[in-house]
Image: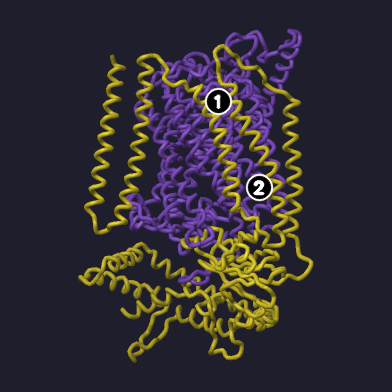
Chain colours: A purple, B yellow
Amino acid sequence: MSTAAHADHGSHGDHHHKETFISKYVFSMDHKMIARQFLITGIIMGCIGVFLSVLFRLQLAWPETQFGILKMFLGSFAADGVLSPEYYMALVTIHGTIMVFYVLTAGLSGTFSNLLIPLQCGSRDMASPFMNMLSYWFFFLSSVVLLSSFFVSTGPASAGWTVYPPLSALPKAVPGSGLGMTLWLTAIALFIVSALLGGINYISTVLNMRTKGMSMNRLPLTIWAFLLTAILGLLSFPVLLGAALLLIFDRSFGTSFYLSDIWLPGEGAYANVGGSPILYQHLFWFLGHPEVYIIIMPALGITSEVIATNARKPIFGYTAMIISLIGIAVLSFLVWGHHMFITGMNPFLGTMFMFITLIIAVPSAVKTFNYLATLWRGNLKFTPGMMFAIGLVSFFVSGGLTGLFLANAALDIAMHDTYFVVAHFHLVMGSSAIFGMFAGIYHWYPRMFGRRLNESLGHLHFWLTFVSAYLVFFPMHFMGLAGVPRRYYMFTVIPEFEIWADVNVMITIAAIVGSVAQIIFLWNFFSNIFRGEKSEQNPWKSNTLEWTAPLEGIHGNWPGAIPTVYRGAYEYSRPDREEDYYPQHIPGDDDGVYHPESEQKATIRKETVEVSKDKEIVYFTALRSIFGLNKG
Amino acid sequence: MKKTFKLLAGILGLISLFGLLHQTDFSLVQLAASEPSAAETATQSSINWLLIIVSILIGGIIVLIFDITNLTTRVTGKNILDWNKLNAWLCLVFLILGMGAAFWEFFYHGKYVITEKATAHAENMNMMFNATLFFTGIVFVIVQVLLFYFLFKYRTKEGRKATYYSHNNKLEIVWTAIPFVTMAVLVLMGMKTWSNITKKSSDNPKEIEIYAYQFGWNARYSGADNIFGEASFNYISGTNPLGLPVDAEIDALIVSLTKELNGDTIEVNGEPRIIPGLYTQVKDSIFNLYHQSLLEEASGIGLTYTEDKRNALQKKIESIESGAAMADLEAAIYRKEKQIQRIAQIRSAPSAKETIFNGSTYDDVISNEIHLVKGEEVIFLFRARDVIHSAWMPHFKVQMNVVPGMQTRFRFTPIKTTAEARVERGNEEYDYYMFCNKVCGSAHYNMKIKVVVETQAEFDEWMKTQKPAFAKVNENEVQLEEVAPEASDSAKIENKELALK
């Protein structure tokens, strides 16, 4: 239905104006190039984030031991090669910020939404290529601002990635809350602008610019995941922007939204009275909790696609997968209070948040079982992408189950802010989402660069990363249950925690091995951009539309008309076909669904499908007029 | 031809990498040897360096080896590694080893998990924990075993086609319903446990105020009259760090605040010296004079100045020129004026004499240890001075945030004395502690207070040794014991500095 508007675009697609270096590689408006920009920036930020974690892991494993590497990279912040406590906090803070926002939000969702939404939906480009370009450059600017805080004399923000005031509001309370914090807030504000520009684009593209035949119930699950992620982001990021603005006011203009009853040595009693630090936490987690689903949902979408393709089976329970995604998306807005059970809020509120949080486990469980059922009796092809997708499922289960402990308000009293939490979220959203991102990179590398990655290196990368991630995070559960608090600079001052010294050393060594393993990936990724083996058109024998567009990535995606879609994305190994895949764009004499029963039944189905499509058109025309998109 | 060339280049690269490794190795050892002065630490540091570099190089070598296998595959057309088979077997190995390791850890590290019943609510919570562990444990084992077993079993084979199996509504309803029922059980159990812990107590628990600041804790007992004086951050001073409503202290505080604003005269070597107050300092003429004096000082820097001193001077000049110094002065004036205003407001309220300044605070006891009585229900009333802290007593399963400007509370009953805990552990030195568990600044990791649980008799004995924080009668001898020493006033010091110019 949207092809009409873009038909004229497509007809002169091949004699468009000449591209200069700048318009092609720098200020590009082509979604494939923007995806690559997001990915490479995300990878660079990821390297920095992982590197920071290795630096502070050194301190945790060998406290007060001198390391030349620390002095070399941190200078006066690690005088004599020993990390200072303030700078330890700064490293933890920036590691968290980079990984959560810059790698797993922008790097993951930014890359694959940009790459796949137009290609899998069958559109020439994003709804607004210009806004898309702005989205990347705001993200880039935000990254630069964040990293620039490393060069501030008082150091970067150091109040934890959640930057709770009053600690983050008082430069006298911790040095990192000076200029470093201002830069952090500026970076996050820019980041939110980028996320909103991207999100609005993804939503309008998915809703309006699908090719003929691509009804919502034929959309690949990746696109469903990106769509719901974008909606989550659009509804929750503005709240974080509000929270950040109020914090900026408190810091710079003397307001008291979050401050009250504060006395600091050298300063005396503060003039700010009447605010509530807990208000910030409510606002922050109103974004913060949907944010973890913003991170994991695209990874789950990618996994669905990669597992189905490489198992050579339809994804089990396509509709159930969509319903559980929607369920997760809706519930994710109602659970933020489980981060705040012990802030002193009304116990009754705690009860409600506990109830909803435990219920959100149901759709997550359904997704996991459906992945298992998809693997059952498959014909599994272990490409590196497939291995990483499987790694995601394993992490998602291990980390998700520990969430049932933390969601329980009573148990949370004894677990809040301990290493148990660190283990939980690093498995369920950290490692999981990173593995989803790697699955996507290995799977769509040929689509992005037209070349193939070295498979052996991919597998080596997978096994090293997979094993070391488990070695790093699994023991942390036990540390947490023994009462070890997170964000501690060292544990040697508390005799009770000294039993964990060996475990800390083991974790750090595993972390170093895991980080070094990423060099394999970096080598594989960057060297093959130029010298990799040229990929064939559809290397994984996938059904989806992105493999029908030329791999060299032309402007407008398809040289001729956009292919029409005749069936769902997961028609693998159909008994009525000789080949084990059935691409969406190949016309068949069926209605897109395989019926083992009679021809009669098939024709009845066909009619019902058409009726529902009519309904859909009415529905989306209404939606379009609401958004005022009909003119475009 | 081109491929063979690439292969050769790869091998050459590998050889040169080995050479590089050898060379790096050599030079690093030399570096360590040439610095005998910082003997041990330098060697330690170079060894660490060496380890890092060697591990990176090993990574590089592995990459190259794999690259070469890939090249040979391309040249000869033969697959050296069949990754499908290899991965399937690796999955099986990982499943067995991983499950084995998980169980080993469960029993090895599991013994450190705190299951101690040191409080009345611990039993209830342990039960809740075990129930959750039971359900999640079953799911964890089943799902991981199925996942990796499927990977092994259904690995690709020539000529086999996957089963077309796209959905099964009955099955899906079953595995939606099972987690739903499980969750319902957990939710109900959780609600019961939670309300048991958080519900209001029927009897009157003993109240203890826990006061948190960067980076320490104090406990305040209400003394004989069982009433706490209503403290406020407005009254905090060097001699009254908890901000208790002590008239003499507050008078002294107002005097010192007024002096800071208006200036003071002190005696230096028998001569009176005027210390300009903030109102004077902020005047343009005075401020410029100060600026000039600093500039002169900077231009005449002699050899006596250390690097640090020079930097400090430079920083001062910069902060004046950027306007930050002026802004700081103005902010300080505003802060102090407001504080005086607020105190006056509190004191002028008609009921202030009865409700706040009624003398109930004079018998309050401030302690550097928390003493609790076995079997007696207590409620902690938390108060923070500066940023959010969190009171964390792992063995008691007690945790609550301590928020400035907002009172939080936690009620519990300790049921095991420190002496009993010592016997149990076979450690005569063992003590319970309360830690800070919300990041609060640089010394967060070392913010703790000893918790002593004892019998009523021992508690009474200890209480007898504690003096009330403020003497009630003699206002001139007001003094405080065992409290935080760091309450200094840098504004005062700065004033003196100015006066000495």
- Chain designation of label 1: A
In this rendered view, identify the residue nearer to me: B302 or A252. B302
Which residue in the protein does label 1 denote?
A306
Residue B346 lies left or right of residue A267; in this view the side is: right
Which residue in the protein does label 2 denote?
A405
Which image quarter: residue A175? bottom left
Mark sitting earlier along the chain (2/1): 1
Q: Percent position (x, y) of residue A428?
A: 58, 40
Quadrant into which the C terminus of chain A falls? top right
Q: Residues within 10 Å of mark 2 (few under 14, many from 20)?
A: many
Under mark 2, the amino acid is Phe
Q: Percent position (x, y) of residue A31?
A: 47, 28
In this rendered view, identify the residue nearer to me: A271 or A343. A343
Quadrant into which the N terminus of chain A falls? top right
Q: From what the image shows, is residue B472 above or below residue B277?
A: below
Residue A602 appearing in the image: yes
Q: Percent position (x, y) of residue A497?
A: 52, 57
Q: From what the image shows, is residue A609 above or below residue A485?
A: above
Residue A187 appearing in the image: no
In this rendered view, identify the residue nearer to me: A622 or B372. B372
Under mark 1, the amino acid is Val
**Label 2 vs label 1, nearer the camera:** 2
Q: CA distance from mark 2 to mark 1?
A: 31 Å
Which image quarter: residue B22? top left
Q: Percent position (x, y) of residue A416?
A: 61, 53
Dot label at residue A560: none
The residue located at (43%, 25%) in the rendering is A456
Q: Check contact, mark 2 vs mark 1: CB within 8 A.
A: no
Q: From what the image shows, is residue B353 above or below residue A333?
A: below
- Chain designation of label 2: A
